[in-house]
Amino acid sequence: MIGEQSRWAPVFAGMTVLRFFHTPRGDWKLWIAAWRAMLVMLICASLTACSQHTDPHTLTFWTIGREGEAITQLLPEFERENPGIHVVLQQLPLSAAHQKLLTAFAGDSTPDMTQLGNTWLPELAALGALEPLQTRVAHSSIVRPDDYFPSIWSTNVYDGVLYGVPWYVDTRLLFYRSDLLKAAGFDAPPHDWNEWRRMLAALSHPERGVYGILLPTNEYEQLMSLALQQPDSLLRAGGRYGNFESQGFKRALTFYVDTFRLHQAPPITNIEAGNPWEEFGRGVYSFYFSGPWNIGEFRKRLPATEEADWNAAPLPGPVGPGASVAGGSSLVIFRKARNKQAAWKLIEYLSRPEVQGRFYDLLGDMPPRRSSWNQSSLRDDPKVQAFREQLERLKPTPPVPEWEQIVNEMQLVAAQAVAGDLTVDQAAAEIDRRADRILEKRRWMLDHAHHAASEAL
Amino acid sequence: MNRQHAAWLFLAPAVIVLGVFFLLPVIGAFALSLTDYDLYALADLHNLRFVALSNYWALLHRPLFWAALGHTVYFVVAGVPLSMLVSLCAALLLHSPLARCKAFFRTALFAPVVTTVVAVAVVWRYVFNTKYGLLNYVLGGIGIHPVDWLGDPHWAMPAIILFAVWKNFGYNMIILLAGLQAIPSELYEAARIDGASTWRQCRHITLPMLAPTLLMVGILTVSGYFQLFAEPYVITEGGPLQSTVSVLYLMYNEGFKWWNLGSASAIAFLLFVIMFAVTELMLRAGRKEVQA
């Protein structure tokens, strides 16, 4: 908040002023608001200026989303083991986290360490905000790279330098209604796209409002997972250009769009989908393409008597079992952290297999290390075995800071193709055009002399 | 100290405040709009490029900007008259001598203005729900097929307009009510003696006397509605198919989601120019009307 207000004060004040200029209605109100904001800013700035330097044993740690709640139960033990360290936790809501991290960097008020989604890691690494961790890992007896799922580990490496340690993994696969599949004559979940297509056809009855699968048209994860299964990479020439006109991406997009054209998925967004868990329970959808946290959601929202009627399966690929996206969060230390040693201790503590096992019990976040999967509750739960299998077949997204923006554009264009406004070829060309525009600055950076300077920063 | 110096001394606080909080930021934002300030520039100022007007040029060649402008204009053109009509009707009803419990209704009708957008948006998302929504239930009652309010690109904007009108009409209603109360009752008395019907009283006394208030309310509403942001942000997130992306929404996405502050500033300035022109036109039209 401090960084947000101070660094961008001119911009915010500019917007306030612009509004002031053309809304006579709010003139005095806005003046008061502006003054109040300034006052708050000054107070906050002076308060943190004092508090930041009082306690050298304080470790500030930012978490994003639900993890913040669960971790409060793991921290007391860490503080008992390390009496000198006091962890100050700040929980960021997911929707505001990205902005907050960037503004904290801009305002020079980054914490010691944070949880960081691994698609955001390239962005902060490119900013030079993160501390390289290679030497610490090399000397650690707890964090052992070979125990981690390799694809997840590789998402923490940017330009050959390690910046984070995976905390939990997130991927996308298929939840399915085993009873409905059985009733339609299928004994096992699909292994490849052809089989999947046949099941979708048998299970869709659009005239009754029943569909094979729910693919919200404003979520990019599903199409991205299908695209990652392809041999072609999504960007080409070292992340300088989009590669969406490749055969592979077009194949994925065709499969995705066909699912809607054949009325095997309703063309709706997740806002309209409302309560997909209940509809899955009622059999409106036989497949649900989503992530690990939904095991908990389904258990919570569906009656225990229906527990045997649903299960999870690894993602089918074009020919045989397919890959899925390597998502999740890592733990990173900021370059400007005051307490790097304590931060690394906390990372080591949270990386212990038994702590990760407890973390899974608290929240359902899946551990990134193979040895953590030998913990009892993970070993014995039949529903998570599909994830265990999928984790060996993950593919990371292209490690460029612009990826999030590109993949958002990809989904916007794909939604137009779903609506029938564009053909698959047109859509692929349009995604490439937009990706190339977004990557323009990156190309300039890579070709520019300042590249070396910014690397050294 | 001569009089002129003294005058400047008295003006100084206001001039300093205006300079620091108005002039400097505007100049700063304009300067920003001439660069490609982005994430890379945030990391290292050497990565900042001066691009002159190419942010503006790129915007004018971007279909999404024109689409956003189109959606915003649609929202203004459809939303403002509707909003004012509802406000006027509500004000007339409240002003009517037949109305009972005026204080209660005044508060109740004003309540949406002071509620949080985010909170009521959640409620309205349920109202607009295709399968379970109240609106489709009512429409179903009179034999109209369910409308996919938030999922159909053609219906999403009308849904947003409906929500915005409901949310905002109370504000204008209060201003118009004050305007109505300022009309001398002698005029109505004289009209009744002359045998004028209620409609003619409304047409020839109420509306002309209310004209200046209506013009002011109109300008306020237009400039407020041009800044459409919160409603699509919380109800549709700009969708479906970006059919509810407004200019301000586009600016927010560019600036605070993707951190392209250069092009976000350019959007802000373009919107400023457009709104300035529209407000100026309305004021001129209003003045001509008053003179005529």
Image: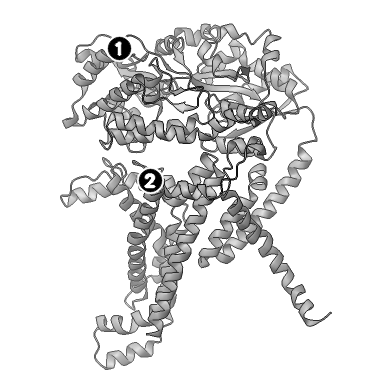
Q: Nearer the viewer, residue A301 or A184?
A: A184
Q: Chain of mark 1?
A: A
Label 1 with label 2: CB-CB less than 8 Å: no
Q: Which residue is mark 1?
A: A192
Q: Is residue B288 above or below residue A18?
A: below
Q: Give the residue type that dot 1 points to.
A: Asp
At x 53% / y 23%, what residue is drawn?
A399
Q: Which residue is mark 2?
A: B63
Check chain identity for marks 1 and 2: say if they share one: no
Task: Answer with left or right where residue B2 lies relative to residue A293.
Answer: right
Secondary structure state at the residue bearing disc 1: loop
Residue A11 coordinates in the image, percent (x, y): 60, 51
Residue A135 coordinates in the image, percent (x, y): 70, 13
Q: Nearer the viewer, residue A359 or A41?
A: A41
Residue B217 coordinates in the image, percent (x, y): 43, 70
At x 36% / y 38%, what residue is drawn?
A271
Rendering colour mode? one colour
Secondary structure state at the residue bearing disc 2: helix
Q: Is residue A136 above or below residue A236?
A: above
Q: Which quarter of the rendering shows the N terminus of chain B?
A: bottom right
Q: Is residue B290 above or below residue A456?
A: below
Dividing the picture into quarters, in which one does residue A270 lie? top left
Q: Nearer the viewer, mark 1 or mark 2?
A: 2
At x 47% / y 49%, what residue is drawn?
B57
Q: Is residue B25 above or below residue A244?
A: below
Q: Nearer the viewer, residue A106 or A448?
A: A448
Q: Give the residue type that dot 2 points to.
A: Pro
Dividing the picture into quarters, in which one does residue A140 lie? top right
